Image: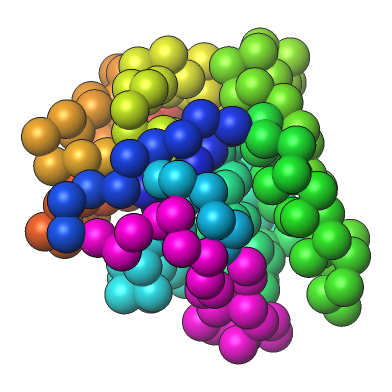
Amino acid sequence: MTARRRNGAARPAPTGTRNASAPGRVRLIGGRWRGTRLEVPAVEGLRPTPDRVRETLFNWLMPVLPGARVLDLFAGSGALGLEAVSRGAASATLVERDRDLARSLRAVAARLPGGDAVSVVEADARHWLAGVPEAAFDIAFVDPPFAEGLWNAVLPLLSSRVAANGWLYVEAPLDAAPTPPPGWTLHREGRTREVGYALYRRSVPAG
């Protein structure tokens, strides 16, 4: 989830985007927490996924969100994971290495009705994934700091942590779109002027 600072690493905002050094807010755009404002701290490179892209993504996911276990692996502002729970996911785990951002996410969850469905983990995504049980999640959002190029490091670790027929959302620069490991089938994709985003479904052969 989200050209933003994720897991403690600053991510340069793509050319033509808002200067991420300026503080601001984004809002949840659907579900029971619709209209909730999320602070975007004055952190260089922190830029949550735009409303239009999130609306498109959650329209794609609408049939599978109710009751889903969601992972927002590089949480940043938390917009993707919180939006998922707002729209009916049973739970969301938000992984964020930056201490201040993790603290902010916990504060947001604490003030939302039903926010106990949101768990915030302050950890490095790569190290944390190594200890996650198989099939722990139904939907995973992967939008790491662009400058660090972490897709190839986390996608192989993530595959077995998503349930059979689960879903994977990946966001990346247009010129650096990652290819998920075998076992993922492209479902839908889109792009803005700077960013490409894609939704994959996990395909596990019978037996």
Number of disc labels: 0
Is 28 covered by the magenta stretch?
yes
Magenta residues, start to end: 17-39
Residue at x 72% of width, y 26% of height: 123
Q: Is residue 207 above or below residue 162?
A: above
- The quadrant holding residue 56 is bottom left
Q: Position of residue 59 (x, y in %)?
A: 38, 73
Q: Position of residue 154 (x, y in %)?
A: 47, 20
Is residue 155 toward the left or the right of residue 35 in the image? left
Is residue 157 toward the left or the right of residue 205 in the image? right
Q: Position of residue 116 (x, y in %)?
A: 89, 60
Is 29 covered by the magenta stretch?
yes
Is residue 3 toward the left or the right of residue 66 in the image? left
- The quadrant holding residue 104 is bottom right
Question: Does residue 19 appear in the picture of this structure?
Answer: yes
Q: Position of residue 183 (x, y in %)?
A: 34, 24
- The main secondary structure of the magenta stretch is loop
Q: Is residue 179 above or below residue 113?
A: above
